[in-house]
Amino acid sequence: MKKYISILIISIATITMFNGCKKSADDSATPTPATGVIEFHLHTMVDSVEVADYDSVYVMSSGRKIKVHFAQLYLSNIQLLKLDGSAIDVPGVIVLKKQQIEPYILGTVPSGNYKSVRFNVGLPVATNAATPVASDSTLNQPVMWFGNTAQPSGFVFVNFQGAIDTTAAGNGTVAQMQSFSYKIGTNNNLVTIQLPDNNFTIAPNQTQLVHMMIDYNKLFTGINLHTAGNLIMNTVAANSTSLGLQLKSNVSTMIMYQ
């Protein structure tokens, strides 16, 4: 009986050792990398003044008055730049920045240290040629089309409308303000912006905000406001004029860190 018990104990010990040495499926699996969430926080500005609502009269630092009727734009091809300069894509995200909305959660990305962000103002070529479905709340936006439908003319990348003091001294009255309307689009006017280095960290399971300002006043840089023809650009054809080229150049300067 003692011999039987001894054999049994040895057998149990052997089985236990064998099982202890086996790797489970979980042990051999590749660990899931840590991730966090990236969010853009975007403020609509004219110069140093934040646009709290449409149709209010704002006075810029130069003293020039402006009234914003509408201000929207698209951001796409968003990337986060790591400290070594390599890029992490935030795939499949298109942001329609509206004046009254500031936070935009972009999605999950690898946690770690980053130095900057890069994105396009506008839409990818394929998207710009697509017809949005009715349920697509980002692209099914008639105010962001050049025509009554998205195609064949494509999407408006930046839509900025309002009224501005066009007097030479910039000290005109509200009654003297003139209407302006800029609809910037077409594949040729897609603009890539990479912001200066400003290190940030995305911690595991945490949300990291990147605060930015969109200064629509920058669109007026280099434009003679006293010329009536410089206040309106609403067609695809007009986007290829000298005014369109100037506005495209100005788009590249209108977004900055807060």
Image: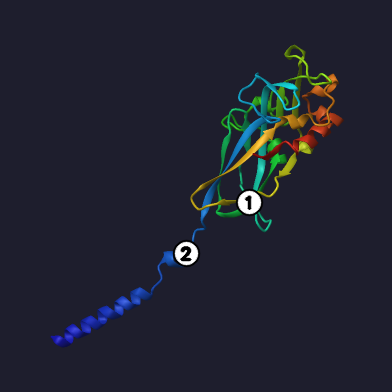
Residue 153: tell me if it is visible: no
Indicate the quadrant where residue 78 lies: top right
In the displayed structure, 153 sits above or below 18; it is above
Q: Which residue is mark 1?
A: 199
> In front here: 180 or 137?
180
Describe residue 187's horizontal placement relative to residue 1 as left or right: right
> Which amino acid type corresponds to the residue marked 2 in the rendered image?
Ala
Q: Position of residue 87 (x, y in %)?
A: 66, 53
In the displayed structure, 199 sits above or below 17; it is above
> In front here: 13 or 54?
54
> Which amino acid type corresponds to the residue marked 1 in the rendered image?
Asn
> In front here: 158 or 7?
158
Most extreme residue toward the left, as rendered? 1
Quadrant in which the C terminus is drawn: top right
At mark 2, the secondary structure is loop
Q: Residue at x 50, y 53 (%)?
A: 204
Q: Position of residue 220 (x, y in %)?
A: 78, 29
Q: Position of residue 10 (x, y in %)?
A: 25, 83
Indicate the quadrant where residue 101 lies: top right
Q: Which residue is mark 2?
A: 29
Residue 73: tell me if it is visible: yes
Count of marks, rendered view: 2
User: Disc 2 versus disc 1: distance between alpha carbons?
Assistant: 33 Å
Q: Position of residue 90 (x, y in %)?
A: 61, 47
Query: Which of the two labelled residues, at mark 2 and mark 1, occupies the earlier sequence position?
Result: 2
In the displayed structure, 82 sits above or below 207; it is below
Q: Nearer the viewer, mark 2 or mark 1?
A: 1
**Crowd tier of the residue under label 2, counting other residues whose Cα lies within 10 Å: few below 14, some 14–19, many 20 or above:** few
